Amino acid sequence: MPAEQETAVRADEPFRLTGIGDEAALGVEGQIAAVSALGWRSVELRTVDGTPVADLSRTAFDRVAGTLADAGVSVAAVDARIGGWARPVTGDFAADLAELAVLEKRCARLGTRFVRVMSFPDDGLDADAWEREALRRVRELAHRAAESGLTLLHENCSGWAGADATRMVRLLETAGPGLALLFDTGNGPAYGYDGHRLLTDLLPYADRILHVHVKDAVIAPDGRPAYCEPGTGDLRIADCLRDLLAHGYRGALSIEPHIAVRPHEDHRDPEERCHAAFVRSGVALRNLLDACVRVPGGAITRTSPDGAALREPVR
């Protein structure tokens, strides 16, 4: 059966399926081709031709927006650099404000209200000063976002609140309605925490989790992650999905494979391998959803070499 028929979103699908397009291809046409191969009609934009969305020239951005519209592919979210690993809390805040100002207009054109942000890594400040400045910056950004109809999505990644549920809740309380949470299933190993445990701590605030990134990894003895298709690693992706569903999550699940593309390492495989890894990860997520959402007890039914049915637990 063709991939687009096998993995297309179904009428009873509880989640919107999408993916960070530049993990599949540099250009917008290739990003569209990758989600279309999965039968999906949505993409998450981070960069196009290696350029962040806010930095695209007006001509380049117009072409991207027009190409997406012509293809009938919507934009689930735009991933900004605001507060990210290269934007420390001591850096020039004007750069973050300027990026948000550009994205206010561009997100309106793209038809999305979600902008991924982080919460400013430390750069030599003491703990109290870091907290005060990170909260101040996120509060101002969230206020501006809310005024323009946007919602900032704080990712559990780099920054003051990146790895701590208590800090994330403090951030939500301080920033107000212009800020919500983006939960990434696979960031824990790189930042020294257990992702499923973090999600468990956040579930009382599940109504503020509005977007989810899905990636999985096998953890080496030295603690380093080797990224793999969803459901084949050690990060309890199925448990995360069940917990989210049980607490009413109905937002996007966005694959970020990190298999053929690892942005922080400036690593990128040839385009055909990026596309293939992206599609494999999408199919794996679709199969995992079928198993943990539709099969009682979260078991996968497989066929053994002799044709007998095998039932195996989902990790």
Image (cartoon, grey):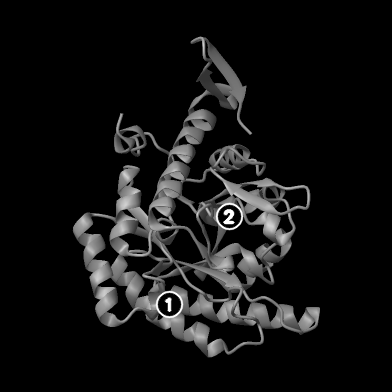
The label number, if any, that marks residue 82 in the structure image: none
Residue identifier under label 1? 147
Q: Please say if 71 is above or below 10.
A: below
Residue identifier under label 2? 184
Asked whether the viewer can see residue 7, the reply is yes
Residue under the image location 40 percent in, 78 percent down? 54
Q: Amino acid at mark 2?
A: Asp
Judge from the rendering whether residue 281 lies leftward or rightward of residue 70; answer left or right: right
* Count of number-bearing discs: 2
Rounded to the nearest whole Å, what is the CA distance between mark 2 and mark 1?
27 Å
Residue under the image location 28 percent in, 55 percent down? 73
Looking at the picture, tell me which residue is in the foreground, 108 or 91.
91
Dot 1 crowding, Cα within 10 Å, few <14, some 14–19, many 20+: few
Secondary structure beneath dot 2 equals strand
Badge 2 or badge 1: first in the primary sequence:
1
Q: Position of residue 1 (x, y in %)?
A: 31, 28
Mark in the foreground, 2 or 1? 2
Dot 2 crowding, Cα within 10 Å, few <14, some 14–19, many 20+: many
Secondary structure beneath dot 1 equals helix
Q: Amino acid at mark 1?
A: Glu
Q: Position of residue 279 (x, y in %)?
A: 41, 45
Q: Please say if 219 is above or below 171.
A: above
Judge from the rendering whether residue 89 lies leftward or rightward of residue 215; answer left or right: right
Which residue is the extreme one toward the front? 270
User: Where, quadrant-wise, is the C terminus in this rendering?
Assistant: top right
Judge from the rendering whether residue 313 lies leftward or rightward of residue 77; answer left or right: right
Please tell me in which quadrant of the rendered image residue 148 appears.
Answer: bottom left
Q: Position of residue 273 (x, y in %)?
A: 43, 51
Q: Please say if 12 is above or below 113.
A: above
Residue under the image location 38 percent in, 59 percent down? 25
